Image: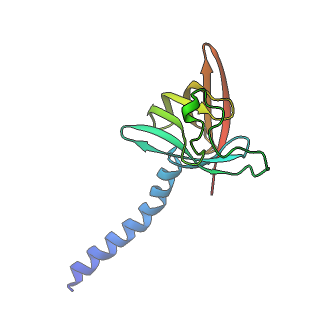
Amino acid sequence: MSLRGASVLRTVAAASLLLAPLSGAAAASSIEGLWRTDDGKAVVRIAACGQRMCGTIARVLDTIPDVPTTDVNNPDPNRRNRPLVGLQILSGFTGGPSEWTGGQAYDPKSGSSYKSSLRLNADGSLRVTGCVLFVCRSKRWTRAG
C-alpha cells in the first residue's frame, strides 16, 4: 500500500471514530426503541410502520396472578382474545424529530382509544398525551434497557 493510501485509510478511520458518538446521539434522540410505561407494567416497542410511527406491547411486566394476558377490555368482543404481547397500542403518528402528532393511543386497561401525540423530552423521556374532546392527559415513559 502506498504512503498516500495509508494516509487516506487513517483519515477514514479517524472520521468514523469521531462520527460514532454522533450516531448514538441520533438514536437517543429518536422515539424508536423500547419504552417502559409510566406505571412500569409494560414495555412498548416504537418503530416505523410505513411512513408513520407505531407502538406495540413488547413485554408485560406486571406479574400479579390476576393480570390478563389478552385484550379482555376491548369493546369489540371479537378482539378480546388477542394477546397483549404484540398488540398495537400506538398508531398513525407523523412528524418528528421531537414531536409526533395525529396518532391514536389504545389503552388495553380501559379498552378506550384516544387522539394522541408523542414528544421527546430534553431528559430523553417520552411524553405520551391522550385527549378526549378538549381534555388531555400526559404520561411520562422512560427508555427500557
Residue 32 position, x and y percent, is 50, 47
Residue at the (61%, 28%) spot, across then down: 129
Q: Is residue 2 left or right of residue 59?
A: left
Q: Quadrant of the C terminus?
A: bottom right
Residue at the (55%, 35%) spot, across then down: 79
Q: Quadrant of the N terminus?
A: bottom left
Which corner quadrant of the image does residue 117 belong to?
A: top right
- Rendered position, 33 above or below 4: above
Residue 33 position, x and y percent, is 53, 50
Residue 88 position, x and y percent, is 52, 40
Which corner quadrant of the image does residue 72 belong to?
A: top right
User: How did the renderer colour the structure?
Assistant: rainbow
Q: Residue furthest top?
A: 134
Q: Residue furthest bottom?
A: 1
Residue 99 position, x and y percent, is 51, 33
Q: Is residue 2 left or right of residue 127?
A: left
Which corner quadrant of the image does residue 19 belong to?
A: bottom left
Query: Residue 119 versus residue 66: which sits nearer the camera?
Result: 66
Residue at the (49%, 32%) spot, across then down: 100
Q: Residue furthest front?
A: 78
Q: How many marks?
A: 0
